[in-house]
Amino acid sequence: MTLATLDSPQLSYSAVPTRGAGPEAHFIAKQSEEGQRRLRETHSLGLGADRAFEELFVVARECRSQNWDGYGASPIASQTFNHACRFLGALPLGIPAPSIGAEPDGHLTFEWHRSLRWTLSISVSPEGDLHYAALLGSSKVYGTEPFFGETPSRILELIRQVSFL
């Protein structure tokens, strides 16, 4: 898996996890990765993903130094950036592109927003944890899911609820 670094503007990512160890498993993962790359390059399916990766890179790069906000914010660590790239790449095609931001604790944030009462925020930690908080009408939902290369089903369901999918 090749990921972008905060010093390299070349965004190359792989969202295809493999649990296999043999040459066949690696071949299948490579073919799947190539297919996803081609889909993301299409105008109708992939334009939002490319823009989201560009936005992620810009935000992470702007916030990579200590005190980036003038109020003592922690820098975005390369581990956080790598986990965020993997999370963004693991989102299924057809999911609306999120807004991307940084938090003073050094986490990167992905947000989906329909209205004041329908919104979802997911914060990616340096350890790869996905902390989420959502307003779903009159309900509040929050929690933490570990990220192991596939988008947790709970988080996908929240994105779908907020995005009308």
Image: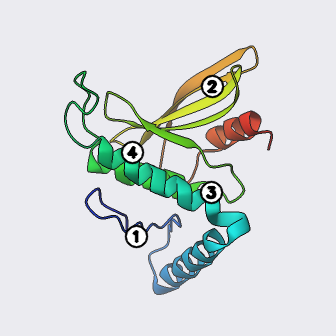
Please tell me which residue lies in front, 13 or 153.
13
Q: Secondary structure beneath disc 1?
A: loop
Q: Which of the two discs, 3 and 2, labels the residue nearer the N terminus?
A: 3
* Nearest to the observer: residue 117 or residue 144: 117
Nearer mark to the viewer, of 1 and 3: 3
Mark whose residue sits in front, 1 or 2: 2
Res. 48 mark = 3
> CA–CA distance between discs 4 and 3?
16 Å
* Position of 77 relative to 123 (above/below): below
Residue marked by disc 1: 1
User: Where is mark 4, residue-wise?
Assistant: 59
How many numbered discs?
4
- Locate residue 157, reporting x and y percent: 71, 39
**Residue indicated by mark 2:** 134
Q: Amino acid at mark 3?
A: Gly
User: Mark 1 and 2 residues: CB-CB less than 8 Å, in contact?
Assistant: no
Q: Compare marks 4 and 3 and give the one earlier in the sequence.
A: 3
Residue located 25% across and 31% down the image: 74
CB within 8 Å, label 1 to label 4: no
User: Does residue 8 sit above or below 99 in this rendering?
Assistant: below
One can see residue 149 in this view: no
Question: From mark 1 to mark 4, how far is it between C-alphas?
Answer: 22 Å
The kind of secondary structure element at disc 3 is helix
Could you tell me residue 57's position as x and y percent? 39, 53
Within 10 Å of disc 4 (Cα), the crowding (few <14, some 14-19, many 20+) is some
Residue 50 placement (x, y as % from top left): 55, 61
Q: Quadrant of the N terminus?
A: bottom left
Q: Amino acid at mark 4?
A: Val
Q: Secondary structure at mark 2?
A: strand
